[in-house]
Image (cartoon, grey):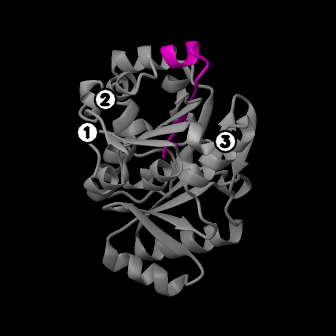
């Protein structure tokens, strides 16, 4: 099988799930894929502004904000901007409830609410050790993803208040707030269409439950050894952990590199 494109989740897949570093084997693997003419796409929950170290590796195509914003070099392939009125309504309700909200433009910002659970979630999902800035210009920018930091009890209040919105949990303390669906799989389909590549010619690697749909729609879906059990159950192959050169191991096993 001659695969033409590889989609790589970032945190816990490209990066070592234990310390957040990028293994040397993965850096070499990305270079090898590119030298063979195989496209490499980062598919991440991160905003674009937090992908500079990946750009330095030569990656030119980014699915960011869990699929809400896709860019190849300077060209926007796909975006799903949220309704500004909805954003404002949720901001005002979150202020009353004292819940954290994050906003993904090309940058990453929050609403200023601080608590230990939020900081823990930021560390686990984006490798952040501190809160981002609040964005004073948010009202004039396109927001591609908004996330709510809350437990299930708090979320019930939002579901009651905003029946027209979907609250999609992807971390024990974080949910996407959606009107139109945002997903890595839809972003992948748009990316494949942009490059003129068939789904069967694509590989995807991931470790989290927001990677499930991504692994399901490509020709070869690979779960990292450190992946959630749910993701492992839908994968075509389970490789070694990201701390054990899992990307390189799988691509060598399938004789892609």
Crowdedness of circle 2 by 10 Å Cα count: few (<14), some, many (20+)? many
x and y, in percent, of residue 40 in the image: 56, 28
x and y, in percent, of residue 136 in the image: 62, 51
Q: Residue at the spot x=48%, y=87% of the render? A: 160
**3 and 1 marks in contact (CB < 8 Å):** no
Image height of 68 relative to 61, above or below: below
Q: Looking at the image, can residue 128 be seen?
A: no
Q: Which of 255 and 224 is in front in this view?
A: 255
Residue at the disc numbered 1? 225
Mark 2 or mark 3, which is nearer the start of the sequence? 3
Mark 1 or mark 2, which is nearer the start of the sequence? 1
Q: Residue at the spot x=50%, y=14% of the render? A: 31
Residue at the disc numbered 3? 191
Q: Residue at the spot x=68%, y=56% of the render? A: 80
User: Left or right of 197: which side holds 56?
Assistant: left
Residue at the disc numbered 2? 246
**Occupied quadrant, residue 244:** top left
Q: What element carries label 2?
A: helix
x and y, in percent, of residue 33 in the image: 52, 19
Q: What element carries label 1?
A: loop
Q: Nearer the viewer, residue 202 or 26?
A: 202
Residues under labels 3 and 2: Cα distance?
24 Å
Q: Residue at the spot x=26%, y=54% of the render? A: 229
In this view, the residue farthest toward the bottom is 160
Q: What element carries label 3?
A: helix
**2 and 1 marks in contact (CB < 8 Å):** yes
Q: Which residue range is magenta in the image? A: 32-46
């Amino acid at each position: 099988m001659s695969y033409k494109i590889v989609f790589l989740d970032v945190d816990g897949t490209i990066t070592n799930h234990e310390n957040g570093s990028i293994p040397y084997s993965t850096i070499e693997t990305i270079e090898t894929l590119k030298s063979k003419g195989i496209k490499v796409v980062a598919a991440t929950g991160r905003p674009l502004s937090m992908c500079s170290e990946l750009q330095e590796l030569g990656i030119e195509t980014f699915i960011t904000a869990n699929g809400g914003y896709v860019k190849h070099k300077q060209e926007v392939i796909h975006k799903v901007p949220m309704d500004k009125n909805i954003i404002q309504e949720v901001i005002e309700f979150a202020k009353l409830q004292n819940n954290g909200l994050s906003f993904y433009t090309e940058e990453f910002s929050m609403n200023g609410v601080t608590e230990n659970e939020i900081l823990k979630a930021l560390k686990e999902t984006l490798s952040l050790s501190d809160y981002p800035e609040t964005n004073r210009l948010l009202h004039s920018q396109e927001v591609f993803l908004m996330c709510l930091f809350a437990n299930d009890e708090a979320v019930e209040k939002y579901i009651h208040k905003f029946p027209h919105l979907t609250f999609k949990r992807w971390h024990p303390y974080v949910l996407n707030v959606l009107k139109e669906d945002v997903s890595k799989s839809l972003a992948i389909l748009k990316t494949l269409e942009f490059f003129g590549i068939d789904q069967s010619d694509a590989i995807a690697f991931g470790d989290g439950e927001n990677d499930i749909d991504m692994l399901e729609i490509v020709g070869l879906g690979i779960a990292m050894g450190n992946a959630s059990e749910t993701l492992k159950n839908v994968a075509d192959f389970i490789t070694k952990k990201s701390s054990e050169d899992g990307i390189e191991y799988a691509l060598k096993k399938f004789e892609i590199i």
